[in-house]
Amino acid sequence: QVHLVESGGGLVQAGGSLRLSCAASGSIFSINAMGWYRQAPGKLRELVAVITRDDNTNYANSVKGRFTISRDNAKNTVYLQMNSLKPEDTGVYYCNVQLRLPTDWDTGREYDYWGQGTQVTVSS
């Protein structure tokens, strides 16, 4: 069984910063990509940032230059440093992890796991 635990959300004024963390634990053989998505009220969930095992990153255009994604492979943890926050960054942030279970060590099959979500609210 795999668990993802997120932390770091909260209320911040525009221009402020927050750092999100997401730790994966449980029966894990390996982790490939790790990422953050967000969902604002009345909108679809969208990709914010993703990082591969080789530390290649990709960001939504709306957060480029303000957000930084990183990971600690030894801790199975992904981070999202959010600076210069704007009211439009408000939403529930979800981490996503693509991983391989021990039972699939030789098949290459990977699974998507999601965190429970953490609320980020940016006031103007």
Image (cartoon, rainbow, N blue to C red):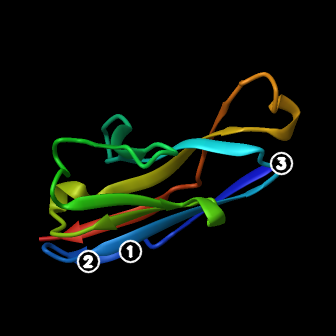
- Disc 3: which residue: 1
What's the CA distance linking mark 1 and mark 2? 7 Å
Distance between the Cα atoms at labels 2 and 3? Answer: 34 Å
The image shows residue 62 at horizontal and vertical percentages of 16, 46
x%, y% of residue 35? 45, 47
**In screen coordinates, is 72 left or right of 86?**
right
Residue under the point 25% across and 60% down: 67
For marks 1 and 3 on the same chain, the one whose residue lies earlier in the sequence: 3
Residue pointed to by mark 1: 10
Mark 1 and mark 3: span between their CA atoms?
28 Å
On the picture, is 84 further left or further right than 80? left
Give the SS element for disc 1. Answer: strand
Q: How many marks?
A: 3
Residue 119 found in image quarter: bottom left
Contact, CB < 8 Å: mark 1 with mark 3? no
Dots 1, 2 in contact, CB < 8 A: yes
Res. 8 image quadrant = bottom left
Identify which amino acid the numbered label 2 is placed on. Val
* Element on which disc 3 rests: loop
Per the image, the residue denoted by label 2 is: 12
Circle 2/circle 3 CB separation < 8 Å: no
User: Hey, what amino acid is under mark 1?
Assistant: Gly
Across and down, in percent, residue 123 comes to 19, 71
| Amino acid, disc 3 | Gln
Q: Quadrant of the C terminus?
A: bottom left
Q: Position of residue 10 (x, y in %)?
A: 38, 74
Mark 2 and mark 3 lie on one chain; the one further toward the N terminus is: 3
Residue drawn 43% across the image and 67% down it? 20
